[in-house]
Amino acid sequence: MKSKYFIGAMAALLLGACSQDEVMSVRQDGINYSVTTPSLTRAADSYCNEDLPTSFKVWAETTEGNLYINGDVISQQSGSWVDQNGTRYWPTEGALDFYAEVNGDVEFAFNNGAPTFNNFTVQSNVEKQVDLLYAVAKGLSKENVTVELNFRHALSQVCFRALNNSTNLSVQIKGISVGHLTNGGTFTFPTTDTDENYTHPEHGDEEDPEAPSLNGGTWALNATYETQYDVTLDAAVTLAPNSAVTNLTCPGDDHANGFKKVLTLMPQEVAAWNPTKTGTDYNGAYFLVDLVFSNLAGETTTEVYSGKVAVPVAIDWEQGYRYIYTFVFDEGGNGGWTPDPDDPKPVLANISWDVDVDDFIPVYPDGGEDDGTHLDTDEEGDDDDDPDEPAVSYTLTFNGNRPADALDGTVSNMPDALTGNYTYTIPDNTPDCGDNYKFLGWSSNQNATSADYEIGHSITLTGDLTLYAVWKKLTHIGGGAGTDEGIDG
């Protein structure tokens, strides 16, 4: 399950989170800046109010539509912002519209006052990905004295944590990938000022319920969704049974862990990979987790699975947000899927139990014959006095038990009722009622919160029985209240 957080707060030019002493002094009629911006910077140098860029490029046009500043480089020098192309002066009459960017020099096009980043592509190497920034400040004149530019993030960030709730399973994680994504597109600057600044209270990863909804530009994305981004951890992370949430790649409070392993990607919406629809490639978005599952029994450790595990994920990323995903390894999970879209199989098979007890074998110590005082029973336990008596038969019915607030109007992929026997195996159908609920299994109790029966379990009936689908509500974090839910592994 995904968590949504704002990326720090890229309040560039406003220096909103910095002391007023950092605002440069004003020269007579010269165009001065309160800003931020660098070039060719890795995601390891992601920006916020406490870590401003060191330079940026700026364009300006007059109210008549004439170009007034054409890509000047503004750099921070000794606490002041200095135009490397020489001092620019305000026009005597009229106002100027300013547009600025960081890390988009190659792709930027002014377009007569309708700027774009044309065909921007996210680097495949996480350590070469950049924090693409943009700012708009319109209608400024010499009365404003200083051009205050507040930069926004054009991209989304993605990072990972993990939690092991299992009792007997150790999990070692070596790396993470996210795939079936688009890697680029063309960005159009907003037509209004980006003047509202956001500052995260901890400059960290935790949810901020007070985060505002900010205006921004728009992306026209490439239509090809074939890109996979890989993150290899510097050292494997081992999660002991019943351990606390462990950070894998997130920057943490005050960005103490840095951004070296934080993915900075295109904002996009992609449906989750459906393992039940096989094919030569993934049909939706997925995570690949490179890990080792080990069974613990006392002091003995036995490797259960080593390799990559595929986890379906529905993606809806917006620009300027950091998405924190927590992989949760719970009791009873299937561990994800083998990374073969043509024939995916559950990585873990739960050990289930089916118990029989032998009947007592009758013995006649005196060697006498059957005196007719008992009934012979066949191996099914039926009276065999009547050979024409039909076999025992009960019906097993499945009820979708749809939650009232499920996104889908009906429950899909339901198994058919079973009849003609009295011992059945739970079918491998996985019902679906929308992205806000997860199917856990089946129970004879319509109000159950945990499953009594899962796919593949055997059930012996003593009469007709209805099993009800058990659902777990998934709550998205960020942009509103919620709980820190994870993705079942």
Image (cartoon, grey):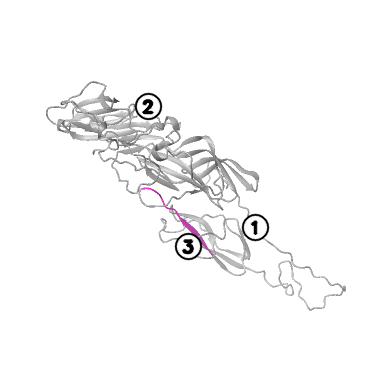
Q: Which mark is residue 353?
A: 1
Q: Position of residue 263 (x, y in %)?
A: 43, 36
Real-space Cα separation, disc 1 to disc 2, in angstroms: 59 Å
The answer to whether residue 124 shows anywhere in this view is: no
Label 1 sits on a secondary structure element that is loop
Q: Position of residue 197 (x, y in %)?
A: 28, 40
127 relative to 85 in the view: left or right: right
315 relative to 163 in the view: left or right: left
The amino acid beneath tag 1 is: Trp
Q: At 39% across and 31% down in the image, what residue appears?
A: 45
Within-10-Å neighbours for mark 2: few <14, some 14–19, many 20+? some
On screen, residue 384 above or below 7: below
Within-10-Å neighbours for mark 3: few <14, some 14–19, many 20+? some
Q: At 26% across and 22% down in the image, what residue appears?
A: 84
The stretch of residues the image draws in magenta is: 467-478
Q: Position of residue 32 (x, y in %)?
A: 21, 28
Label 2 sits on a secondary structure element that is loop
The amino acid beneath tag 3 is: Asn
Q: Position of residue 23 (x, y in %)?
A: 24, 31
- Earlier along the polypeptide chain: callout 3 or callout 2? 2
Q: Which residue is mark 2?
A: 40
Q: Which residue is mark 3?
A: 401
293 relative to 95 in the view: left or right: right
Q: How many marks?
A: 3
Q: At 82% across and 70% down in the image, what residue appears?
A: 363
